């Protein structure tokens, strides 16, 4: 009898919980106000119904925030992530947390017409949760520099500013074409792109960073199908890269990274280390956004200075703007690069 | 053991449900988006009286579609883990037993990861594909429990020391397999997986999955509750219990299956949340005594309270970003465990 009583008490409580939600489900059934919609298929292959016009955008990736600014849509950006630090104005937007663990309720509170995500950084679960709340989300998924440009143009279409997309795309394309002309006759440099130095993580051949290296007149010596492969130093010594490439928020910090590496046992075995042959470029190269083109130009200038010495034949050559001033950035903490770091955290925790 | 009276039991359950209610209200109020207590009370009353049209739509979405489902998920996950822990501890007569230590949580994680890996290769309808991960986690938990059970047998009898060792070794083996998968496979949603492995409630499960979780909880908890008096006698030892007329084989089977079901369900929706199954039953034993007829319901409430509190902290400490709830339970749980252990020694 007593047992039944306590079972009943517990049962009643949990049954109340059950009912609480069943009742709570009712309000969510109210239909959204009638608006105009346009249907798109995003780069993850999902159909997306985008309200027209898109007035309130939430970006869940630093690269997408940069793209929105590059398209001149910053006034419609109503929220972004803690790691959206470029341009500086993006830091002042309301924050919704990190790209991997955003606060859904913060996103909802910003009443977005459209949430932008990128497949390489955000989680499927976030997208599913947004679907469940009937908030439209559009995913990009660029894997090469060309795809970054075409993806930017598609995004401009979705956001209702196709002309801005065409203009931006043409401008980026012009810079890349010019670069290819200068570099076409030069043999590519063999480089090691260092994503993370301890443990040593580089980039796989399928990443947009590897593609950016190619466009800058370099080939990554790492030929891995994994996106962020963990490489052994032995392998690096065997492959002997011509240059080490660091992506850093400041050129001094990149220099610092090199000095730290050079002190480590084994790294003296690299000719590039003994001869201090390394390049430091803006960490814009880590983000699949339009600014990557300036990082590519910057790298090309450091790897192939001879191609950029004054050429009298280049009469109508447009002056290449200096690479964007690198911003202090925490991006590495938030990018996919974080995977190995997270793994370690998990390993310790479990 | 003090004699059990209905009034004592009801008073204790009433106290705990009052605490849980307060915790739930606080959890509904706190979050990245500030909500006033007055507005919250207003909205809750309106929902109760079904005047839902008067709610402001933002709050409605945030409170009723984001916070409340998450809190309810936390309640059921916490209650499941805690009841599973209490019954494993009684069955194995070992204070260290819990789903996490026995490797069940890791088994569920491996199952979920294998499901994530094979999912793109199977042409499944989206509704079925969404169920694949929880089903994988449940199968992983069930297989691990079975394997650990057989590894823990000694001359046909369960030996609790051997069983615990088998569980600990299986857990670290399964962890190694997870690390192997995660560092060798390319592509896929592994970023999410890493976060998920530490336990999190931020991803609402499919509606059907949460219904299965709730009914599964009632079913399994009720099954365990039917053995509550037998578990009390088992505390004296298996032989002694057998002499007192307990069908030890049946009790073991019922509790083992039901507790695995609870763990598998909980892990499949929330990932591996540690310390709840281990600690909450100990705290409840200190507060309310070790009579399982009281311990099992109070542990359910205690687990629910613990997980909702931990998840509220996980949501608010670094707001608007979020921490994995497993990190919160470990940060709070490990020192508490050490304190309880030292206190027992003193």
Image (cartoon, rainbow, N blue to C red):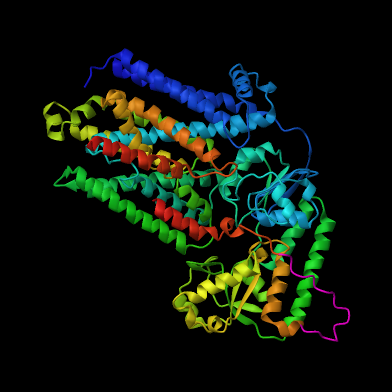
Tell how many labels.
0
Q: Is residue A158 left or right of residue A201?
A: right
Find the residue positioned furthest to the right.
Answer: A316
Figure check: B121 above or below A52 = below
- Can residue B213 be spotted in the picture? no
Report x, y in % for residue A142: 66, 61
Figure check: A40 above or below B227 = below
Tell me, yes or no, whether the highlighted magenta stretch contains residue A219: no
- Residue bounds of the magenta highlight: A309-325
Viewer-proximal residue among B63 and B159 = B63
Q: Is residue B341 left or right of residue A240?
A: left
Figure check: A78 above or below A21 = below
Viewer-proximal residue among B197 and A51 = B197
Report x, y in % for residue A288: 67, 62
Q: Is residue A109 left or right of residue A3?
A: right
The quadrant where residue B15 appears:
top left
In percent of the image, x 43 and y 20: which residue is there?
A12
Quadrant placement of the N terminus of chain A: top left
Q: Is residue A53 left or right of residue B117?
A: right
Report x, y in % for residue A137: 67, 46
Report x, y in % for residue B263: 37, 39
- Can residue B132 be spotted in the picture? yes
- Main SS, magenta residues: loop
The quadrant where residue A45 appears:
bottom right
Viewer-proximal residue among A322 and A111 = A322
Find the residue positioned furthest to the top.
Answer: B7
């Amino acid at each position: 009898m007593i047992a039944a009583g306590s079972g009943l008490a517990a049962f009643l409580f949990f049954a109340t919980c059950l009912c609480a939600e069943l009742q709570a489900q009712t309000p969510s059934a109210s239909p959204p106000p009638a608006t105009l919609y346009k249907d798109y298929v995003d780069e993850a292959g999902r159909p997306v119904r985008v309200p027209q016009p898109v007035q309130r955008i939430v970006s869940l990736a630093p690269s997408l925030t940069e793209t929105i600014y590059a398209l001149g849509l910053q006034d419609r950006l109503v929220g972004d992530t803690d790691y959206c630090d470029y341009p500086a104005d993006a830091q002042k937007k309301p924050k919704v947390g990190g790209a991997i663990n955003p606060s859904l309720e913060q996103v909802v509170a910003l009443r977005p017409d459209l949430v932008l995500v990128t497949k390489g950084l955000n989680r499927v679960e976030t997208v599913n949760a947004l679907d469940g709340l009937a908030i439209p989300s559009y995913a990009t998924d660029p894997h090469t520099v060309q795809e970054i440009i075409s993806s930017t143009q598609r995004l401009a279409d979705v956001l209702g500013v196709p002309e801005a997309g065409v203009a931006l795309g043409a401008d980026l394309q012009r810079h890349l074409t010019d670069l290819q002309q200068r570099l076409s006759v030069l043999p590519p440099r063999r480089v090691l792109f260092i994503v993370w130095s301890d443990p040593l993580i580089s980039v796989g051949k399928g990443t947009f960073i590897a593609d950016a290296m190619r466009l800058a007149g370099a080939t990554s010596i790492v030929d891995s199908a994994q996106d962020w492969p963990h490489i052994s130093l032995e392998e690096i010594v065997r492959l002997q890269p011509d240059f080490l490439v660091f992506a850093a928020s400041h050129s001094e910090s990149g220099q610092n990274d090199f000095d730290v590496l050079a002190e480590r046992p084994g790294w003296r075995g690299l000719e590039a280390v003994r001869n201090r042959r390394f390049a430091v470029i803006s960490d814009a190269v880590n983000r699949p956004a339009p600014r990557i083109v300036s990082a590519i130009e910057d790298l090309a200038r450091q790897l192939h200075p001879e191609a950029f010495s004054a050429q009298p034949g280049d009469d109508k050559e447009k002056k290449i703007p200096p690479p964007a001033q690198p911003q202090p950035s925490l991006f590495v903490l938030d990018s996919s690069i974080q995977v190995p770091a997270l793994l370690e955290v998990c390993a310790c925790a479990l | 053991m003090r004699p059990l009276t209905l009034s004592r039991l009801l008073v204790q359950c009433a106290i705990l449900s009052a605490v849980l209610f307060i915790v739930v209200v606080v959890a509904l109020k706190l979050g990245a988006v500030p909500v006033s207590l007055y507005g919250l009370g207003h909205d809750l009353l309106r929902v109760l009286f079904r005047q839902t049209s008067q709610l402001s739509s933002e709050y409605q979405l945030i409170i009723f579609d984001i916070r409340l489902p998450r809190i309810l998920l936390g309640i059921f996950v916490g209650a499941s883990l805690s009841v599973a822990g209490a019954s494993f501890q009684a069955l194995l007569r070992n204070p260290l037993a819990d789903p996490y230590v026995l490797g069940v949580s890791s088994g569920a994680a491996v199952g979920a990861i294998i499901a994530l890996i094979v999912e793109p290769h199977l042409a499944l309808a989206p509704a079925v594909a969404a169920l694949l991960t929880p089903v994988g986690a449940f199968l992983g938990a069930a297989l691990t429990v079975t394997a650990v059970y057989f590894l823990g047998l000694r001359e046909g009898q369960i030996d609790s020391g051997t069983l615990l060792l088998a569980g600990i070794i299986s857990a670290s083996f399964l962890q190694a397999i997870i690390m192997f998968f995660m560092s060798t496979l390319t592509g896929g949603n592994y970023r999410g997986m890493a976060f998920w492995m530490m336990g999190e409630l931020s991803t609402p499960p499919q509606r059907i999955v949460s219904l299965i979780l709730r009914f599964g909880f009632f079913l399994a908890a009720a099954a365990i509750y039917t053995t509550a008096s037998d578990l009390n006698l088992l505390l004296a030892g298996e032989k002694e219990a057998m002499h007192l007329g307990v069908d030890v084989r049946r009790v073991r089977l019922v509790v083992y299956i039901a507790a695995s079901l609870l763990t598998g369900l909980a892990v499949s929706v929330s990932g591996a949340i540690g310390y709840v199954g281990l600690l909450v039953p100990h705290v409840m034993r200190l507060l309310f005594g070790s009579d399982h007829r009281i311990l099992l319901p109070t542990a359910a409430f205690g687990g629910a309270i613990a997980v909702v509190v931990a998840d509220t902290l996980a949501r608010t400490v670094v707001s608007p970003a979020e921490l994995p709830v497993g990190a919160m339970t470990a940060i709070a749980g490990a020192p508490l465990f050490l304190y309880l252990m030292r206190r027992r020694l003193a």
